[in-house]
Amino acid sequence: MHENIRPASRDVPLIQLGLNQCRFPVSEDRLVPGGYRFCAGPTSPDRVYCDHHHTVVTAVDPRRARPGLHFPQRRAA
């Protein structure tokens, strides 16, 4: 199973999502408007993703989190 699909995902088209339902796309479906189905799991009032998908989208890729990697600051003109 892919890490972005949790067992409780309900595969709901966007038009059927209500308030406080996860808007993380879990599958493609050309037969629904927009072409995707969404998780629809419960969310906090201040989030658009359920706890599981919030963790997925905010995770840091360990290959990118290298110590000592600094990007030069651009100066304003």
Image (cartoon, rainbow, N blue to C red):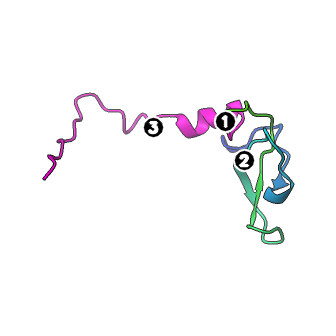
Q: Quadrant of the N terminus?
A: top right
Look at the magenta stretch and give its main secondary structure: loop
Callout 1 touching callout 3 (CB < 8 Å): no
Q: Quick check: is 74 in the magenta stretch?
A: yes
The first of marks 1 and 3 along the sequence is: 1
Kindly identify which numbered label has been placed on residue 61. Answer: 3
Region of the chain picked out in magenta, as a range: 48-77
Nearest the camera: 27 or 33?
33
Q: In which quarter of the image is residue 8?
A: top right
39, above or below 45, in the image: below
Outermost bottom residue: 31
Outermost front residue: 77
**Mark 1, secondary structure of its residue:** loop
The first of marks 2 and 3 along the sequence is: 2
Q: Which residue is drawn at 75% across and 34% down?
A: 43
Q: Mark 1 points at which residue?
A: 47
Neighbourhood count class around disc 1 (C-alpha, 10 Å): few under 14, some 14–19, many 20 upward: some
- Give amino acid for label 2: Arg
Distance from disc 2 to disc 3, alpha carbons, whole Å, reads: 22 Å
Q: Quick check: is 51 in the magenta stretch?
A: yes
Q: Quadrant of residue 48?
A: top right
- Residue 27 lies left or right of residue 67; in this view the side is right
- Give amino acid for label 3: Asp
- Give amino acid for label 1: Arg
- Residue 58 lies left or right of residue 3; in this view the side is left
Q: Mark 2 points at which residue?
A: 23
Nearest the camera: 3 or 14?
14
**Mark 3, secondary structure of its residue:** loop
Labels 1, 2: front one: 1
Provide residue 2's location: percent of width, then percent of height: 68, 44
